[in-house]
Image (cartoon, rainbow, N blue to C red):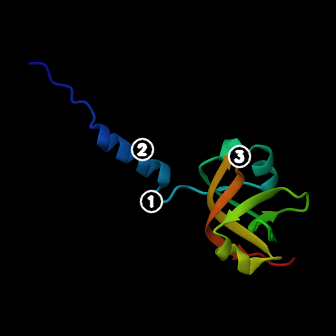
Amino acid sequence: MKARRRSANPTAVTLLVALLLTGCGGEAPVSEVPLPVLANNPAAHDERQVATHGVVRHFEDPLHYWIEDEDLNRVEVFPHERIAPYLGEAVRVEGLFRFSRSEGRRLTLERIERLGSG
């Protein structure tokens, strides 16, 4: 008698892959990506969880906030009300990075921390 081969359940396989990609905590892994890399190759990090750092700046009309480094590499940060209290400060941010030719480089905050001045 021949043994029957069972095919894998597609839902179970999808769930397993998702767990392996996100780890046990259920969150997507965060990659440390310097601002120059995000500025020069944004498409490579589109729709990924990233962490980067810079100084918070803003512009009034239209209102927007971003972080930038000493070479003026920039990423806009959302939501504005969460980043606004850090204006002028060096911060490390984590969140979902998105890039589009029409809207530029954007990061939606999940975590933010002040960095030391040294």
Q: Residues within 10 Å of mark 1 (few under 14, many from 20)?
A: few
Q: Between marks 3 and 1, how big is the CA–CA gap? A: 31 Å
Which residue is the extreme one toward the front?
A: 61
Quarter of the picture containing the C terminus is: bottom right
Q: Residue furthest left?
A: 1
Between discs 3 and 1, the one toward the N terminus: 1
Q: Which mark is residue 102?
A: 3
Q: Is residue 16 above or below residue 52?
A: above
Query: Depth-wise, is mark 2 or mark 3 nearer the camera?
Result: 3
What's the mark number on residue 17?
2
- Residue 7: x and y in percent read 25, 30
Q: Is residue 81 above or below residue 17?
A: below
Viewer-side residue, 108 vs 54: 108
* Residue in view at x 73 percent, y 61 percent: 76
Which label was assigned to residue 26? 1
Q: Look at the numbered disc 1 and give the secondary structure of its residue.
A: loop
Horizontal side, residue 23 vs residue 3: left or right: right
